[in-house]
Amino acid sequence: MTLLPPTYDIGKSYEENFSAGPVYASAIPPMRAARKTWSFLGFELSSPIGVPAGPLLNAAYVELYARLGWDVPVYKTVRSVARASHPAPNCLFIATDMLAEADAHTTRTVAPAPQSVGGLTITNSFGMPSMAPDDWQADVRRASGAMRPGQLMVVSVVGTPGADGRDLKDDFAHTAALAKAAGARVIEANFSCPNVASAEGELFRDAQTSAAIVRNIKERIGDTPLIIKIGALPEDHLAAVIEACLPFIDGVAAINTVPLSIVDAAGNQALPGNGRLKSGVCGAAIAGVASEMTGRLLAIRDRLKATFAVVSVGGVMTEDDVDHRLAMGADLVMSATAAMWDPLLASRWKTRQG
Ligand SMILES: Cc1cc2nc3c(=O)[nH]c(=O)nc-3n(C[C@H](O)[C@H](O)[C@H](O)COP(=O)(O)O)c2cc1C
């Protein structure tokens, strides 16, 4: 399969994609009636396939992907204050050399566009831009309205230290409460973003701080299910984070992008601007790290006799990858990079189910 243009035009700015996107010129395949349903956090779903926080910038993107059969779209991470995106370019191609966890923070060079989705690895660097709350709340309501029976939209939130005088913990809870007020049925707290230099970037490494934040969020959102989005961690460290957060969470989504230093062919920082040498890598090259984390989360869940949902994210490029993560025991499987370049993946997977 040759690589088609993505729904997010990587040659344009975030703002242009936000107002003019998504790019999609093909037909919408007919929606098939689900032959079996899937249960997730008490909701009945037509399939266990979703798009994680990122590629769905606003209601127009959420609506397109819902129509294309991605039954669990995640609304891109929002903040309690408006924040501009890092300047373009925001996505660059990287060679698909399979990464190991130990490769985090090493250096990779940009590469030409691959020929197929199987070789698709990118770095993405946006810095978690956000509309002002009034605007994203109205847009979240619009996006929720696009959900059909068997679909569930999740809203991703992040705290912004110092926003209107709130500390990180309080701002996380405040933002989650804003999402709930906008009708979010499930909230995801983003504890991992390699593309911001501030404290919210690697929270998932700190069990006590993560637990304090989810406790605070839970106090504000009550019975609305709460997922944490985290990056890769070794088994013991991961277990400590999960155990600390367990009383307050309903699910864990992993992984976010893997942080690497990205340089051009001459060895210079590839993305323009301060603090952008380090950038998150996603797509095919992170499949190994991501599926190991899924295995680790499932093993920890068994050992703790816990019931939190496991959302497998990272390097899911094909229908076989979806099946593989489901066979491991993941409750949901999500694709960001492949979903951008191959928006028909979910529909093909469903067709294959018969
Ligand atoms: C364009 C783009 C934007 C992203 N923005 C976010 C974000 O705002 N919040 C977040 O939690 N993850 C974000 N991510 C990370 C994805 O949710 C996902 O964890 C990561 O890309 C790994 O999945 P993949 O290999 O299928 O791309 C973004 C990813 C991409 C490709």
Image (cartoon, rainbow, N blue to C red):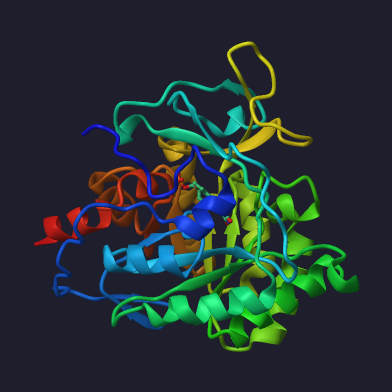
Please determine whether, in this image, residue 312 is positioned above or below residue 113.
below
Question: Where is the N terminus found, in terms of image quarters?
Answer: top left
Residue 41 vs residue 352: left or right? right
The location of residue 227, given as percent across then percent down, is 56, 69
**Residue 162 is drawn in which quadrant?**
bottom right
Res. 306 visible in picture: no
Please determine whether, in this image, residue 318 is positioned above or below residue 261.
below
Q: Residue at x 62, y 52 (%)?
A: 238
The location of residue 143, given as percent across then percent down, is 45, 75
Pick out the residue farthest to the right.
Answer: 165
How many numbered markers are drawn? 0
From the viewer's side, name the closer residue of 59 and 299: 59
The location of residue 262, given as percent across then percent down, is 62, 26
Pick out the residue farthest to the left.
Answer: 354
Residue 55 vs residue 219: left or right? left
Q: Residue at x 62, y 62 (%)?
A: 242
The location of residue 170, given as percent across then percent down, is 81, 74
Res. 56 visible in picture: yes
Residue 339 vs residue 198: left or right? left
Please determine whether, in this image, residue 218 is positioned above or below residue 279.
below
Question: Where is the C terminus found, in terms of image quarters?
Answer: bottom left
From the viewer's side, name the closer residue of 166 and 85: 85
Residue 322 vs residue 28: left or right? right
From the viewer's side, name the closer residue of 354 and 250: 354
Q: Residue at x 44, y 79 (%)?
A: 144
